[in-house]
Image: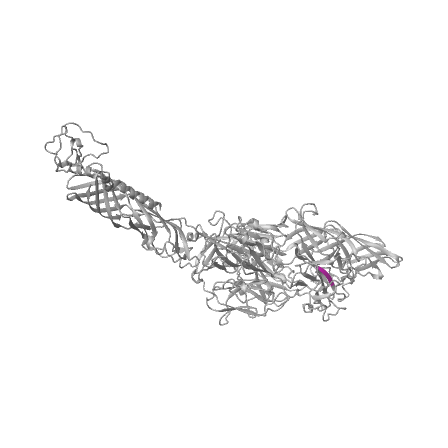
Amino acid sequence: MVFAFPADQQLDVPLGSRIVVTFSERVSETALGACTPTSGAFCLVGPGGVVEATPEIVGDGFSVQFADASLETGTTYQLFVRNELVPAAKNLSTEPFVTFTTRSARPKSAAPSLIGINGGPVATPDSFRPMLESSTIRLVFSEPLDPRTAELAAGAIELVDASNTAIPATLIAKGIHVAIDPKDDLDPGQTYTVKIGSGLRDLSGQQMTPATVVLTPLDSGASQPIPQVLRTRQENDPGPARSRAGADRNVIVIDKPLIGRELSTVQPASLAARLGDPDKLGGPIAFVIPKGQRLSASGLDVKLGGQIPAGLSTGDILIEFLTDGGGRIYRNPFQPAEQRPENLASPLYVDLSMDIAIYTVDPIGNAVISQIALGVQATGTAVATDGVLAIETVASMEMGLLGVTSAATNLVLELITDTSATVDTDREAPTLIATSPGEGTQELAVGNGIELVFSEPVDLDKLRAGGVTLQTQGGAAIPTVIESHGATIVLRPRTDLPYSTTLDVVLGNITDLAGNALAPRGPIAFSTPQFAGTNIAMTVLAVHPGVPCSLTGTTATSPGRCAGGENSDDVYRPFDLAANDPVEVEFSQPLDRNTVALGTACGTGDVRVEELDGNGGCIRSVPGSLIRRERGLLFLPDAPWADGTRYRFAMISGGDNNCDAGELCGVTGDAASFDPLNGVDGGGGGNALTIDFVGAAPSGATYLFSAAGPSTDINGDGLVNGVEVERDENRGAMRIVGTTGDVTAARFNNPDCIAATPEREGCIYLLGSMPTQLGELISTGCPGGGSCVPVFLTPQAMYATSLSMTTTVDAPIIGDTDIDADTGITVMRIREPAGGGPVTGYIVDGGGTPKMIVTLDLYMDAPDMELPLSADHDLISKPLTVTLEGPVTFLADGRIVIALANTADVPVTVNIDAPLGLGGAVNMILPTGEMKLQLVSRPLRGAEP
Amino acid sequence: MLARALLIVAVLGSHAIASPQADDKEVPAAKKKAAEKAPKKPKKAPKKKTPPKKPTEPEIEIEMEPEAKAPEPYSPPIPPPMDEPEPVAIKAKAKPATFKKIYLRGGIAHVAPLSQSRELELADIDGPASLAVQNGPIAGSGSTVSSATIPAITIGYRLTPRISLETVLGVPFTVKFKATGTLRDMSIAPTALGIPTGVPPIGEELGEAKAAPPMITAVYELTRGKVRPYVGAGVAVLFAYGGKLTNPVLTEVSQPEMKISPAPGLVLQTGLEAKIAGRVYARLDVKFIALMLARARVEHVEVRAPALPLFDTVEVGTAKMSVWVNPLIVQLGVGTDF
């Protein structure tokens, strides 16, 4: 055996990594068979026993791989390779050949801690990859960090020398990874300390367990480097005929149901590299690939589910070294140390660690793709032949897709030395392509960061040295951290921004890593939404799993109905939650995060996640992380939800409007209200929101939490307050088409919603969020035939602003009498299909671009609508059916937009019963195309952590 | 081994052709004695022709020295044309003059190659070595072959009194190959991918092999007399065997295999032979073997790359040397005729 990936003792192995071993001779196909923990030619064993996976012989018969192993996060696996696979192999045994541990990027309830450095455990930082004077220091934490705290600063992350003097360095952080790239090479033999302080926090706000790691870099001879040029190997280039990794070389494979399996081919490119002194390390040769250099790969025409054109062509994909990449070339670790390198039997080994930016040429594609991947650990072999050193490395990483998920991405990169090659010099200045939110808009959510999407990565050090600042219009600086996301940077305020404020992003000295400067330009203004004071209590817009209302009570077959609805309402079917999905809640107003208390035992806290027994009794509080957002909560259990296990999620708001201890409250100071059908203007408090659900197996679907945006009703009070900006993207236009009975006339008192029509329509502005699951491609049951991507919606609710209407009733004696009434907030609840199954929409090919079609059965309620003279109305649980259709597109900042509109008039009849036997109805419609619902995914990079 | 076998065959062949003892054994001693004494006996007048007794029976031969005269009473009826002072072999009937057919000259020979080499050529380079060197000639490199002095015996067989075929027998001698030019003074692989390898210049010493250049020449004596200049020409083949590299750099790791192909050449010969006393002759012989291209091939050369501990040793493939040996052979010898 001459090569294996992952490497033995490798930590932080991305899920979805291809597991491959390669031999110097062909393997015996007949040896592949069943595995037990103690037998089998090629077996992967985890804590739960043998991992189900399909062994494949690849690489012209020299390699065996598992490409479909279903790995768990943060789990240690052992790969057994036994002699029957290659009887002639001399270096196989009955012991596990490779042991590796998968990445765990899941938030945890325990305090965060440093768990890895330079690929090895903290206690033995040099065990996996020695620290060299030229090394970038790469840290791995036990859980994702709050990016607002991840910085090179006292109390957070520090790199100091023996005299405790800070070493100038560039820090880049993302998720569980931090890269510290010293500006200059360190002094070999001197001691340096990485200090992790309690100022560093996880996403739930827990402080880091302080740690210090002492590093003494080895002298690799970097002070007198030997220049080298590495070039991506092309078809007719010299080099070995066969891949040692058993895969197509210089091909990036991205595999995810959301987009299917996509291949991207690495284009011709050259990289300057520096070799260290081969004598310094007693054999291994260190090498450095200086930051700022790029590879390019062919672009992707993104297809949802692999077939539905997404209308997104990325153009060439560029991969830029964000920090100095590097590693070592050394003797094959599977052979005796004295074994001289031989191309076939004992090829040289290579490890390469890198932090890369991924972005694209196409502006929209760039906005969608732009990201970074830190701590990419490539392992491979180097073969000297035909006058070149051909370095073939295997790397695996998780690549963000469309801002909604990540995909296992496997790359086999083959570079060859080429003394005649030249390295292109970047002479192109970066340009600012887009911002998120858009320049001049009032859509800057107070908890979000500002994204600046450039055409290429820019120099972080210059940005942090004042190259970009966030200021009030009065010129006061707002403290921010600056994050790198490839060609995009995020200016993230350390604390929530104030509402109703205009801010400027001031661009100064901004260059790319080659020094090309961004053209000067003026400040970019953004505003946070106008937030009007209100006494309406905070309620829930969406909850996953479940429905955003207090339920009437659980039965054996149903969690019941929304409290306050009609008794004839449908009862909901039991809720379940896929193993890796979070519990997520979105509120109608900002949350008072100080009132959020996650229960740690049964029946404690105002946010409770509990495991239940068969009778619904609490067994324990589920350990996990609760992330408090400006308008939401997100809970992730430490361990995935167990299939078939009963759980309960509950939020407590108390019995009255007062925000008392142990109650969840909004920033308005009122306790939250979870039973909107009982009216929202009556103050907060009331029934708890309790969702019982059952854990389910992991799903292949992609979880997408989108929100109606931009929205008008910022404060969620059901009204369009004076300061709120009416947004047309999410609104319905009600048109009165007639009256019946004693109602002789009716008119809206609101401004005409659609000026272009002769009628006077009344606008209702929608507020809501929608947890959805994008399923895998199907080819049956799609609208119009063909293939489509199902979109599974949960039975959430949309809220609409109030309409003011005057109806004229032909009253006895007094004749026509005007009755003025406001509908108050309108709640439109999605009903589950009567025939069973989830609420399902479909994304189909709309002629080169995707189009979503969904038919929703709704209940419409106006719980706060009161008519004078004790008149009554029937706008309670009023069933509606609306078919919505619209394109799926991408915003300039990369967000997914589903802009739906009704495909036919939707009749809405409100019956009025008044005293004295008066009665009648107002017949309205939502005209075709005038029920607009625009769902927008979260900002890809600037969203609140 | 093939070369060695060829050499043995060649040497044995030479012996078979040139061995005077072998000829002597075929002649009965009495007859030989008689033959030797024949010229001194008074001959009966050959009144009638006397056919030879047996075809295989040696003729009575008389070596005619230049000063020799036919017996007085004899007067041949038809005197044959004779070129003075060639010895004349006369059939018994006419008591024809004869000559010694076999001669042997022992002495020493100095073999001095007038070598001129092509550039050392590398081939079959693959693996790590390909990072440092390429297939093809090493610019400025060269090699030579050392001279040698060996005991040697020339054995000749006269076809006619003035024309003979001769060969030289000598003990196989050791030929040393030496590096010249850049091969000697510069590292053959100073860097690999720009990384110093630490491979030193190999120096002068390259290797050695046992060599034997069997040759056969046709010699023509220009004059007869006490001093006989002669010229000759023929062919030679340089057989070499037991080749081995002796260079400490090239043999530090392993002993590569050295193969030397037989090298044919054309021999030009001249010399002078002088009668010292009686039938003892001294001889100065000079031969030049032209167009003798010796091709040596050293396979599986491994060198240590001390500055590249990653590799430690590197197999550099095959080195091919082509040397125009063109030796000048000066031989001094003393011998007699039989």
| Farthest-out residue, bottom | A163
- Return the residue nearer the eye: A62 or A753: A62
Q: Quadrant of the C terminus of chain A?
A: bottom right
In the rendered structure, the answer to whether residue B150 lies left or right of residue A391 reads left
Q: Is residue A433 visible?
A: no
| Farthest-out residue, left | B72
Q: Is residue A478 above or below residue B6?
A: below
Q: Is residue A188 above or below residue A94?
A: below
The image's colour scheme reads one colour
Q: Position of residue A566 (x, y in %)?
A: 80, 58
Quadrant assignment, res A139: bottom right
In the rendered structure, the answer to whether residue B44 lies left or right of residue A615 reads left
Q: Position of residue B156 (x, y in %)?
A: 23, 41
- Return the residue nearer the eye: A142 or A711: A142
Q: Position of residue B69 (x, y in %)?
A: 12, 35
In the rendered structure, the answer to whether residue A36 lies left or right of residue A836 reads left
Quadrant assignment, res A439: bottom right
- Return the residue nearer the eye: A451 or A25: A25
Q: Residue at x 48, y 47 (%)?
A: A236
A650 in magenta = no
Q: Which residues are magenta?
A: A690-694
Q: Is residue A123 above or below residue A54?
A: below
- Return the residue nearer the eye: A749 or B56: B56
Q: How many marks?
A: 0
| Farthest-out residue, right | A813
Give the prevailing secondary structure in the magenta stretch: strand
Q: Position of residue A458 (x, y in %)?
A: 53, 59
| Farthest-out residue, top | B48
Q: Is residue A3 visible?
A: yes
Q: Is residue A362 above or below residue A147?
A: above
In the rendered structure, the answer to whether residue A171 lies left or right of residue B275 reads right
